[in-house]
Image (spheres, helix red, strand yellow):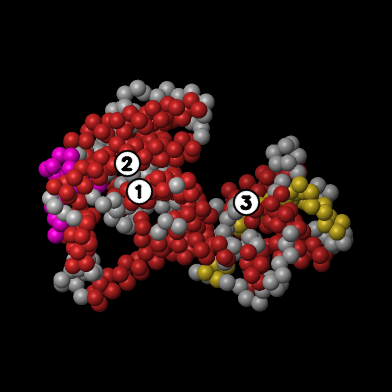
Amino acid sequence: MGSGWYIPQLNISFGCASTMWPSSIKAELIAIWTALLAIPTSIQHVNILTDSQASIDGIKKFTPRNIRQLFKSPNAAIIEQIVRIANLKFASVQWTKVKAHSGDTGNDLADDLAKRAAILAKNYNSYIIQPLYSSLHSVLKFKLLWNNIFWDGQIRSNLITFATLPYCADWIKSKAILPWTNDDHINTVPASVTKYISNLDSLDRIYFSSSFIRWDYTWNFLKTLRHMNRFGPSLSSLTSFAIKALNNLLPTGDILAKRHQLIYNNWTCVFCNTALESLRHLMMCPSLSQQWLSVSNSILNFLHSLTNKLQIRADIPTDPQHFFPALPGQSDSQLLPPVQSLSIGIFPAYILSDLYNMGIRRQLDVISTNLLKHAVKAFRDTIWKPRCILNAKKEKRLGISLADKRFCALSSSATPRLNADQNSSNYYQTLLERWKSNWVMGHEEMTRFVKQGSNGFNWGLCRKNITNLTKFI
Ligand SMILES: [Zn+2]
C-alpha cells in the first residue's frame, strides 16, 4: 500500500509503499513516521495534517503500560517510533484532522503521491519501505518473526486467525462442502461446472463474481440465526437445522444408517418409496417436484415483499420455476440447483447476477442473507417437517421403538469409523496426515493474509467470518 506526504513550507514531498500486514491505517502511519523523520531539527513546532482520524487516535491514545497492552494496539511498532521521534526531536507536535477528498491541496497531493508510489512499487523495489524492526529502539526486548517476516500485525487477534485457519481447511475439505470448491479447494467455479458453459450469457452469469459461493452470506445468515436463539426453542432449532443441512448432517436414511445400521439399512425415501433416502435425494426426488415448486414460489413472494419493503424497484419474474435458472449441465453435475442450494444455506454467487438483472443492485447483503434464511425455513416447513412425520409413521409401521434405537446405538460399533482392516495405529496415521495437510493449507492462507490482508483469503472467507466460523465448528 502507498504512503505519501507533502510539506509546503519546505516544498518537499515523498512517497513510498509498504508490504506485509497491509491496512490503510498502517499506510497513514508510515507517512507520518517518514515525514517526522524528514523534518529538520531546526523546526521545533510541527503541525501534522492527516485525513485519518484513526491514526491520530492511535498515536494520542498510545500509552501501553505493559507488553500485553502493547500487543493489543494495532501497528504498535510504528506508533511507538512516531511517539518517540515526536518527543525527542520537536518541542511540540500538533495533530490536525482534515477531511479527505475535500479539495485540500496538500492532502490531495499526498494522496496522489501515495497512489503513484504504490503503482511504482510493483516494478521498483526501491519504492518499498521495509523497516528493520530488529534495530529500532523499542521497549520490547524481542521481536516476533514468522517465516522471516516481522509479525507486524496485531499479535493477539492475528494469532487467533492463524490458529483457526487449519480448522477452516478441514471444514472446506469435508465431504459436504467439497463439491462446492474447485479441485484445489479454492472458492472458484469448479471444473464440473465450467465444462458445460456453452454460451456467453452463462459465462457472464457464472463469472459475475470472482468467487463461486458467497460463504460470507452463509456466515452472516448463521450469525443472525444464532442471535435469534434467545427468542425461543423454535428459532434455536432452526439454527441447528441450518447447521445440519449445510453440513449434510440431517438425520436422513443414509446418516441414520451410520448410527443404527441394523434398523436403517437401505432406508428408502418416504415420498417416492423407491430411492434410498439422503439429503441429496430429497433435493432431487421426483415425487417432491411440487413441493420444491412451492418452495421456489415462496422465495419469489418473499423477494417481492422484501424489495418492496426496501423500496427497491425490481423486475422480478412471475414464474417460480425459472426465476433462478439452473446451471447448464446441472442435472449431470454433483451440484444442487440454485433453489435447493439456498435451502441448505449455500448462496451461489451466480444468483447475484440474476438479482442484478432483476434490477436489484443495492442492499445485496441484506437481501441475500434474508433469502437464505427464508429458503432454509421454507425447505424445513414444506419438505423436512412432513418428511419427519411420514418417517415417524413408517418407523411405527415397521415396529421400530425408541428402545430399539437406543439398543442399536449401543450395540453398533463404538467407533464406527474404524473398518475391520483398519487398526487404530493406521487410523491415527490417517488423522495425522489429514491434520498435516490442513496445517499446510492454513499456513498458505496465512501467508496470503500477511501479504494482502483479508483480501488475500482464497476460500471466499473474510477475516471476521473466519472468527465467526470458529463458533460453529
Ligand atoms: Zn424420493
Q: Which residues are magenta?
A: 262-281
Give the residue type that dot 3 points to. Ser
The Cα–Cα distance between marks 3 and 2, rounded to whole angstroms, is 44 Å
Please report whichever mark, 3 or 2, sits nearer to the chain's N-terminal start.
3
Position of 71 relative to 115 (above/below)? below
SS category of the residue bearing label 2? helix
At 55% from the left edge and 71% from the top edge, which residue is drawn?
A: 145
Q: Residue at x 49, y 37 (%)?
A: 366
Q: Any magenta on residue 89? A: no
Labelled pair 2, 1 in contact (Cβ < 8 Å): yes
- Give how far apart the Cα atoms at labels 3 and 1 are: 40 Å
User: Could you say where residue 159 lies in the image, as x and y percent from the top left?
Assistant: 52, 65
Identity, as a three-letter code, of the amino acid under mark 2: Arg
**Left-right relation of 4 to 188:** right
> 20 or 293: nearer the eye?
293
Q: Is residue 258 above or below residue 200?
A: below
Q: Which mark is residue 380?
A: 2
Residue bearing mark 3: 24
Label 3 C-beta lies within 8 Å of the nearest ligand 1 atom: no
Quarter location, residue 203: top left
- Label 1, secondary structure: give it: helix
Q: Is residue 206 visible?
A: no
Numbered label attached to residue 241: 1
Please say whether residue 275 is one of the residues in the magenta stretch. yes
**Residue 50: where, in percent of width, then height?**
74, 48
| 34 in relation to 215, above or below | below
Q: Residue, x 63% and y 60% (percent of image)? A: 74
Task: Label 3, secondary structure: give it.
Answer: helix
Task: Name the disc covering residue 430, or none.
Answer: none
Q: Earlier in the sequence, mark 2 or mark 1?
A: 1
User: How far across and how far down the image is residue 446, in percent?
Assistant: 47, 61
